[in-house]
Image: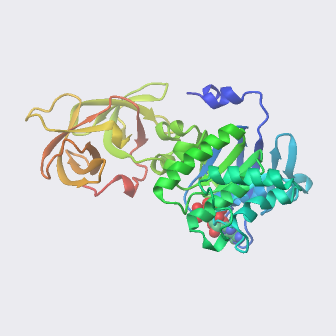
Amino acid sequence: MTELQTKRDLATAGKVPAMRLEHLSKTYPGNPTPAVDDLSIDVFEGEIITLLGPSGCGKSTTLRMVAGLEVPDSGSIYFGEKPVVISDQGFRLPPDKRELGMVFQSYAIWPHMTVEENVAFPLKSKKMQKAEISERVDAILELVGLPGMQKRPGPLLSGGQQQRVALARALVTEPKVLLLDEPFSNLDAKLREQMRIEVKLLQRRLNIAVLFVTHDQVEALSLSDSIALMNYGVIQQQGEPRILYEEPANEFVRDFVGKTVLFKGSVRDANPSGVLSISIEGAPNCVVFGHGYDPDGFKSGQSVFIGVRPEDVEILPAGGDELAPGMVVGVVEAALFVGERIEYQVKVHEQHTMIVYGERHVPIEDGGKVWLRLRPEGHSAWPSDWAVPVSALVESD
Ligand SMILES: Nc1ncnc2c1ncn2[C@@H]1O[C@H](COP(=O)(O)OP(=O)(O)OP(=O)(O)O)[C@@H](O)[C@H]1O
Ligand SMILES: [Mg+2]
């Protein structure tokens, strides 16, 4: 799929983004490398765009520049047609004039106020009528799962409840632009899932633009219209969640978004479209297809690593001494029951030991001979002289 054919591109063609970040860079004094390096992102009305990446990659710095809490060294920010920052011209709208909602990474509510006072605060400063304030506060507290908590003092709330008060306070003015920095990090797993759905529904209803920060890939994949995956202040790839998962631009993206099982293999045919047919080493009858990731292109016979998502490998008890076509043979070294599935450590013939997921209803004992069946297509091929990530291998031969 080319960039221009994505659903998002079609849906947003000709529209002005609700939030436009252009070539933003920021280096903190005393730091040798930029926290954010030439970052550009568009967020349209009704979209959730997620900044995803490891700790320290520059996610919060980006959000803080949008909110006006950090000054970019260079670049521009616009909300719709309205300029917010134009570094070249030394123009910066003060934070309180940006009209955005924000929930910080560390939930910050005012401890000397009740829940109601916290949430009502932004409305009071807008000089809204008392009755309307009360109505809005009640509605938003209901929405974030804190009904009846109006009079509770801030310090008498759990961490998760404080975070929800912060979310309610950010949403109560119904801003066009909402910045969320790990807003669910203090919530338990069930509540996180519920809040994700609630935020998504609310965001659809209000049709606002949300720039969301998380280092949790499941959260990013499930919530976002588009993900910008960052590392060392630089966007590594931006696109619809499925594209990052199925067509990672580089090894960092491949290994950050989801898990990968790596097989050794060699290219049979290199098609100009980038799709390769690949033989798996030690399994002469197993040929699969995948996207090639090498800027220099692949040649027939070239050794490669083939990246396979764990759910694209099926593990079966071996059917006999003759290896069936399309199968790779292995032996289970360890079987770990983890609830919804069994994780097998499998020593694959002429390959590394790897982790493969199996159904919990068909358990295979330690030492059991297995056949691995790979989906015929949709894999990825990587030059074999690139570093093999530790996470992809259990041990080497
Ligand atoms: N006020 C500051 N002064 C100096 N360096 C800073 C400051 N704030 C952040 N940094 C550095 O800038 C880089 C980016 O930090 P940032 O807070 O944006 O990361 P992050 O992606 O939000 O990480 P996390 O997931 O841990 O919240 C880090 O290397 C961090 O140490
Ligand atoms: Mg952060």
Q: Quadrant of the N terminus?
A: top right
Q: Which image quadrant for residue 264?
A: top left
Asked whether, in this view, residue 338 is left or right of residue 115, the answer is left
Instruction: Residue 58: tell me if it is visible.
Output: no
Tell me if residue 308 comes above or below residue 103 in the rendering.
Answer: above
Tell me if residue 241 comes above or below residue 151 in the rendering.
Answer: above
Identify which residue, 4 or 49, lies in the foreground: 49
Asked whether, in this view, residue 335 is left or right of residue 74, the answer is left
x then y, percent, for residue 331: 16, 47
Q: Quadrant of the C terminus?
A: bottom left
x then y, percent, for residue 20: 77, 44
Q: How many discs appear?
A: 0
x then y, percent, for residue 259: 40, 48
- If the picture is divided into quarters, which one holds ligand 1? bottom right
Tell me if residue 117 comes above or below residue 308 in the rendering.
Answer: below
Identify which residue, 132 or 309, lies in the foreground: 132
x then y, percent, for residue 132: 81, 50
Q: Residue at x 57, y 57 (%)?
A: 184
Q: Which image quadrant for residue 268?
A: top left
Q: Residue at x 61, y 25 (%)?
A: 5
